[in-house]
Amino acid sequence: MLTLSGVSYRYAGYAKPVLHDIDLTLADGEIVGVVGANESGKSTLCLVASGLAPGSIGGAVTGGGLAIDGEPMADKPLYAFSTRVGIAFQNPATQLSGVTGSVFEEVALGPMNLGLTQRETVERTNAAMATLGIEHLWDREPRRLSGGQGQLVVIASLLAMRPPHLVLDEPTAQLDPEGTRLVGDALRALAATGTALLIVEHKTDLLDGLCHRIVALDEGRIVLDGPAAAILEDDRLVALGVDPPSRVRLARALDTRGLDAAAVLA
Amino acid sequence: MTHVTVESLGFVYPDGTRALDGVDLGIEPGASVAVIGQNGSGKSTLVRHLNGLLRPTEGRVLHDSEDVAGLRTAALAARVGIVFQNPDRQIFAGRVRDEVAFGPRMLGRGKAEAAAAGAAALEAVGLTDATDANPYDLGYSRRKLLAIASVLAMDTPVVVLDEPTTGQDARGIARVQQVIAQLVADGRTVIAISHDMRFVAESFGRVVVMGSGRVLLDGSPAEVFAESAWPVLASTYLEPTHAARVGARLGLGSTPTEARLVEVLSARG
Amino acid sequence: MPATPSPYHRLNPLTKAVIATVGSIGAFVLGGYIGPIAIIAAALVLAWRAGVAGRLARVSLLLTLPIAISVVLVSVFTRAGTTVLFEIGPFDATVEGVDFALQTLVRLFAISLSIGLFIMTTEPRAFVFDLERRGVPPRAAFVAVATIEAVPTLVERATTISESQRARGLDTEGSFVARVRGLLPIVGPVIIGSLTDVEERSLALESRAFSRPGRRHLLWAMPDSAWERALRWVLVIGLVAAAAARLSGRI
């Protein structure tokens, strides 16, 4: 269980906070989608939830704090977060270490850093690659993979650390449709492992059907937080700069014309 | 205005990979064309031939029937402006106003003229309030719009946009659609590479589908997203729009956009 | 690395590094011509066994030649000497000058062959991980490898940026002055982009416990053997002995 309680955050060197009074809970095995216009604080939320803010990038958390399974994380060293909450970003190229010659080595890097025995490292690496269905890529050079494949390797690398929570900041933003499909399938596979997921995405179609809950941000505050289906159909999303899923948009367009949406979309 | 043609265009990279194979395309002035296809299908390679960044290994590139082989990229930039996908691989000035003035200045315009062109471009993309800001104080969405403005300021008859909606939120996409509509209304040619099928179906009159360096389909959105074309789309890892799928399922013919689908349903009664 | 590495390729990276270092320093320690020429011959023989002799000789010549030319020109005319060969204006070319120039040339070539042989038969990753196994901190190892592997990315970034600027009319094909002026709109984004990349990568790596102190149990180990260890000691001791002999005037 990952909890943010009354958290406000401002970046180092800036006076104004970017996040205000955030109360967010990610229960075990829960999948929460985060939506909002660009610059509404979504990425900052990811950095705070994963401990990288302030841990790695500095800045100040005020008001409350981050707690994982009841334990406050404020003074923990950065590497303590890696086995509790992992984070994936949108660009696969800058997340791959750049120092490994094969996908297997890349995924094994994290477990090795934990000081695990060779046997444990190999076991975790194989398991993570199997979950994401990338065993066939084991000997490929990481830098030569497609965007979608690269993201799968990144996610496998994080999974090998066995964190109970995973934060994903727009994992498909830079991918083509094929890559988006690969990552979408991977997210479903992840969900089946019982890992709690916090996913920031513009592609609400991706979140539709995957998430239990949706949270909407506006100017650094949480303005909507509820069951996924209800939030995705909420009228206020458009005003917040969020594109509803295709089925919702179409239903509204049909309703406006007095046509029977239910019959059409059945 | 400039008619752009590629004839039997082929391109092979120095390492032997073939990126384009016998591509024939003619684009009239004022057209709005979307080029779609999986990564590696040749879309980016194709557009780089339009302003001479790449030179054909086979075939020719023509502007108004003139082979551009002998012309430098710096000269071709006055006719074909290209906005690439990543604004951070372009932005170098400390102020937004200087960034947008760079293109016109490179084309030989005077300071005052370049500043005016820059201001007009910033207004077109909705960044007037950021004129004196540092580009890196803007968020990613707005930096992308800034990159587009920098090329708009050059007033080229042909504007090419490489993945203009990637990483954009709903407002950003709407702004891009506005810009494209305005360019087309002004009689300019707009060519865009995109993998946002809804954006493509809504904003372009013509769609060119590429796969393995060849043109697989070339037609209106209605033609390209019609059910008969779906296998071709699938071969280059593309899917039709949601509206097209719903329309096909209901047997309504080709309905590439929501607007079209609603229209057909209304007419049907 | 070739599909079937030669026995030389398969030597432990540290052994190959020691050979390269001893060869380079030895070229200076050993006086006269015989020493450096012997090193050149040894390097070429080893390179031939490793299947890289042709490429090594070509690359070494390409790299050494520019330096060699300037060194030769300077030495031939400025080295103090008595037997003058010919004159160009106020400068005398002496036999002693030519002799010095030739000796320097031969040493430069020996060094570039020694180091080149190491680079062509060793993967940087293998070398750095071997060092880590011997006690070098993992993060230092990472930085070393990442720096080497970063070069292609840098080149690719500079190319993309150059394309964006050329698409806005920046002339990179014109006069020399134009080309130099054209560098500014490229250098800025390259640097910022590289810094951003580093920042993004270091954030991503934190999630993989990168900053965790302590040793790792590496999955891979470069094999080492008793005779290689012995060879390394023999080479190092030999070098020290030669240096001592040289200093005391024996050779």
Image (tube, coloured by chain):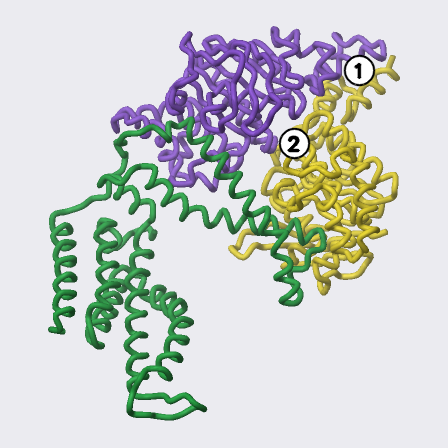
Chain colours: A purple, B yellow, C green
| Frontmost residue, A232 versus C37 | C37
Q: In screen coordinates, is C129 left or right of A54?
A: left
| Frontmost residue, B118 versus B230 | B118
Q: Quarter of the image holding residue C192?
A: top right
Residue at image point 66% right, 63% down: C178
Q: Which disc, if any, is residue A71?
A: none
Mark 1 or 2: the one toward you: 2
Q: Could you say where residue B49 lies in the image, as x and y percent from the top left?
A: 68, 53
| A134 up-or-down from B14: above or below | above
Q: Which disc, if any, is residue B139?
A: 2
Q: Amino acid at mark 1?
A: Ala
| A226 up-or-down from B5: above or below | above
Task: Give the chain letter at badge 1.
Answer: A
Q: In screen coordinates, is A253 left or right of C126?
A: right
Q: Could you say where residue A111 lies in the image, as x and y percent from the top left?
A: 33, 27
Q: In screen coordinates, is C38 left or right of A48?
A: left
Q: Is residue B217 visible?
A: no
Whether labels 1 and 2 share one chain: no
Q: Which disc, if any, is residue A253?
A: 1
Q: Amino acid at mark 2?
A: Gly
| Element carrying mark 2 | loop
Residue at image point 36% right, 64% down: C55
| A110 up-or-down from C49: above or below | above
